[in-house]
Amino acid sequence: MISRQAPEAPVLADEPGPPKRRKPIVVWIIGGLAVFWLLFGLAGGSFEGKLSKVQKNDNAAYLPATAESTKVDKASEQYRTVQSVPGFIVYQRDGGLTEADKAKIAADAQTFKSIKGVAADEVAAPRYSTKNNTTASISVPLIGKEGNVSVQGDDLVKVEKNVIKAAKANAPDGLVIHSAGPGGLLVAFIDSFSGIDGTLLMAAGLVVILILLVIYRSPVLWFFPILSAVLALGSASLIIYQLAKHDVLTLNGQSQGILFVLVLGAGTDYALLLTSRYREELHNYDHRLDAMMRAWRGAAPAIGASGLTVILGLLCLSFGELNSDRSLGPVCAIGIACTLGVMLTFLPVSLLVGRWIFWPRIPKLDHKTDIATHGWWGRFAQGIARHARPYWIIATVILLGCAALLTGLKADGLTITNSFTNNPEAVTGQKIFDASFDSGAGAPAVIIANANQKDAVIQAASRVPGVAQAPGSVCVEVDYAKLAKVPPAARAALGQGCAPEALQVAEVDGRLPIDAIMNYRYDTPQAAKVIQDLRAAVHAVPGADAIVGGQAAIQYDTKKASEHDRDLIIPIVLGVILVVLAVLLRALVAPLLLILTVVLSFAATLGVSAFVFNHIFGFNNADPALPLFAFVFLVALGIDYNIFLMTRVREETLKFGTREGIIRGLAVTGGVITSAGVVLAATFTVLGVLPLVFLAEIGFAVAFGVLLDTILVRSILVPALSYDIGKPIWWPSRLAKVDSPNAPTEPPPQLASVVD
């Protein structure tokens, strides 16, 4: 049993005394680096708000150059100087459109052409639904790229809002007006990230502060980890902004949001570990610098190994095909690297201001740092030791039961209209448009083929199920610049079918673009099936060298690339982390044990997430990237806590033996690691403040997984299983044969006084 009162024990014989500071240069180096990170972080603070200006949130920017839709997108630039994003303005009146409504709609068609950022030549005349007399629409494409210059997401949002503002200006009472189409939905998606550097960051900061107040029970101490995390985020933002601005990496709203919560969460974790060790050493050393040097030497290897593991795990995303995956890894790895730099230099220097920062629980020089001072966790660790086998068996059964729910996970992809947790205007408009018009209008499949085989390609495409059969559904693209010069009366006389050859785009290098209108909206599973069949049909046309792209193809290629990345990257991450753990722990059994437990925890997390998404949140589906992102963050971050635990266990094992080392390691680290897990889980939960289903799913999965790993896996399964195995967990190192090689010949006074 462990006594409730710690003795006034002397420092152990094998414990070092106060450092003699034989290497003061190290202190100066850390101090100099602390000043550097302070200045660099302050300089980078202004770049947090600028990151949105260098984001790319369109799917085409995510795809690799080898994707068929990317090739089509690139080839399409040859046929027109302006690349547009199709979109609509939808008008509806329940009782039927009035003459005043129609006059307003006709006037708007002319007004839209004068709005800067609208592809004026492509603005079409109003269309009235043949299904009812209540709905009309105007095609209002936005300029997405002009020449070699792409329009930034913020600018697209401004243009779309100007279009909506013009449409609603002086509208007759009762006329409902909404945006719709790929352009409107893309703008709604981009606009969802507008609060990423305000609402998200503020919410995450407040959550972390509140938790730190509870953990530290000090009105002062929380300030230092938060300040350090802010400096780390500022430093990372400055670096990432420059890299994204010069197209070294691709930044999107998703990766920016994850970056913010990851730096805050991981930074606070590292701060908790260092601060806890510092508080512990203040009981042994009278001078704060001596205590910090001892704490830094004890905590820095674990923090460094943890950060390195996360960085390497994130960089494994660079092996993916999707640019969004390839860029998320470096973006977050830069964030973790800056966090490590700040937390290992600036934070320890800032904590030296005085013992008063721990007020009202100011640590005193009393040598009460042994296992008895850890109260509940000491008793819990002893309980694990007494019932190790039942504990790890029960924990495993619980995890397997949760993992069994994994069959319910639907990760086939989300349609754009199902991607929001709120109901943006464009989604409402799209539902109205789909009910009144052909849902495939405005976003046709685009086929690039040899001009001498255009007729054969058109015939092959027209026979594909799901391709519209109305006259003019499969045609060579119209040259809108030529069409704009045709008088309105003559344009109206063109009638149905394909445009005359004189109004079609001219061939370039013997190739032409052909549009094929589908019966389905571009982001639906049915449209993806049409793309597959369409590619099979036109690829088979001899001498055509046809390729298929367009919005639906981009969606399909993105999904396939995401599945490829998942299957490739997950094994690589496991291999990398296994190597890091083997080097760190100088063993093979313990790393394999840790990897298996974290993977089991990951499977259990996805199983519970599937149940929650389907039956509680009511989400229609999950993105194919969800398993990959959840795996990378859960395994990389989840292994952190096992690193914190097992490095301390190994340290204690060298003195007291494996089984006693496990008890002591769990007792000493239990409180701080659990606190760190709560902080990290809370910060990822904050992703839910952005109205996007994918981020809400990632936030929940990582938060639940971190808590599961912290509470069940790291606190019960790993120590209980390790205790049951005993010395063999260190195989093939010396510890597997000679337990506690550094143990003193006499029983340690502290241990003797706290164990009956």
Image: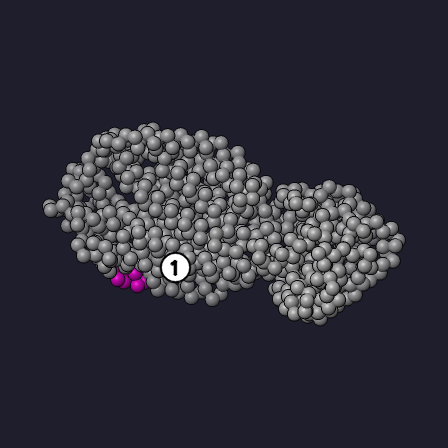
Crowding near the residue tagged with mark 1, few <14, some 14–19, many ≥20 C-alpha atoms within 10 Å: some
Pointer 1 residue = 599
Residue placed most toward the observer, 458 or 87: 458
Query: Please, what is the three-letter code of the amino acid marked with disc 1?
Result: Val
Please report the bounds of the magenta region as a residue range.
387-394
Where residue 467 sits: x, y (%)? 70, 66
- Residue 114, image quadrant: top right
Where 47 falls versus 696 (above or below)? above
Where residue 423 sits: x, y (%)? 62, 52
Query: Which secondary structure, mark 1?
Result: helix
Residue at position x 41%, y 40% in the image: 339
Q: Is residue 271 left or right of residue 281?
A: right
Residue 499 in sight here: yes
Residue at position x 70%, y 62% in the image: 450
- What is the residue that sits farthest to the right in this orientation? 489
Where residue 669 sits: x, y (%)? 29, 46
Residue 723 in sight here: no
- Residue 569, image quadrant: bottom left
Q: How is the image coloured?
A: one colour
490 falls in the magenta region? no
Residue at position x 76%, y 47% in the image: 120
389 falls in the magenta region? yes
Where 700 falls versus 615 (above or below)? above
- What is the residue that sits farthest to the left in this orientation? 746
Q: Is residue 301 left or right of residue 404?
A: left
- The secondary structure that most of the magenta stretch takes on is helix
Where residue 92 sits: x, y (%)? 75, 54
Residue placed most toward the observer, 109 or 471: 471
Residue at position x 84%, y 49% in the image: 485
